[in-house]
Image (tube, rainbow, N blue to C red):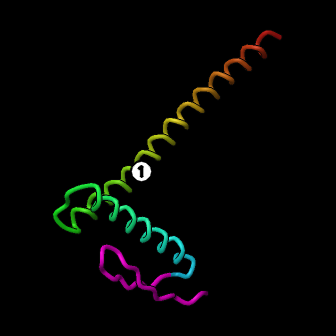
Amino acid sequence: MAEKLKIKLSIADRIYPLTIEPSQEEGLRKAAKNIEQLAKKFEQSYAVRDKQDVLAMCALQFASKIEQKGIDKSEDTTQALERLKALEQLVDSKLSIK
């Protein structure tokens, strides 16, 4: 079993010490970097009062992307099921002729 890894991530001018599995490090560092980049973009593009506003906007942006992917996946699944049902009916109708 791998030993836990202690890292420090900087988000919105604050340092967050974490104890993680080594396999989580890359994902966490990328996530922190994405948050930093998006926060910087929001600070440059909008009049924000403080870091909490920027972080709330970041959270909303990331959460909405996740939710939209779920919606899109659900719609894709529904369409695939409808096509499979149509194909099944077609096969059934061809088999019934014999």
Give the camera-side residue of 78 and 52.
Answer: 52
Q: Position of residue 43 (x, y in %)?
A: 27, 62
Residue at position x 28%, y 55% in the image: 45
Q: Position of residue 74 (x, y in %)?
A: 49, 40
Residue 77 lies in quadrant: top right
Q: Position of residue 82 (x, y in %)?
A: 58, 27
Q: Quadrant of the N terminus?
A: bottom right
Residue at position x 41%, y 50% in the image: 65
What is the chief secondary structure element of the magenta stretch? strand
> In the image, is residue 3 above or below residue 81?
below
What secondary structure is marked by label 1?
helix
Q: Quadrant of the C terminus?
A: top right
Magenta residues (range): 1-20
> Within 10 Å of the Cα at label 1, are there few (<14), some (14-19), or many (20+) other Cα atoms?
few
From the viewer's perspective, tell me whether residue 93 is left or right of residue 33. Answer: right
The residue wearing badge 1 is 65
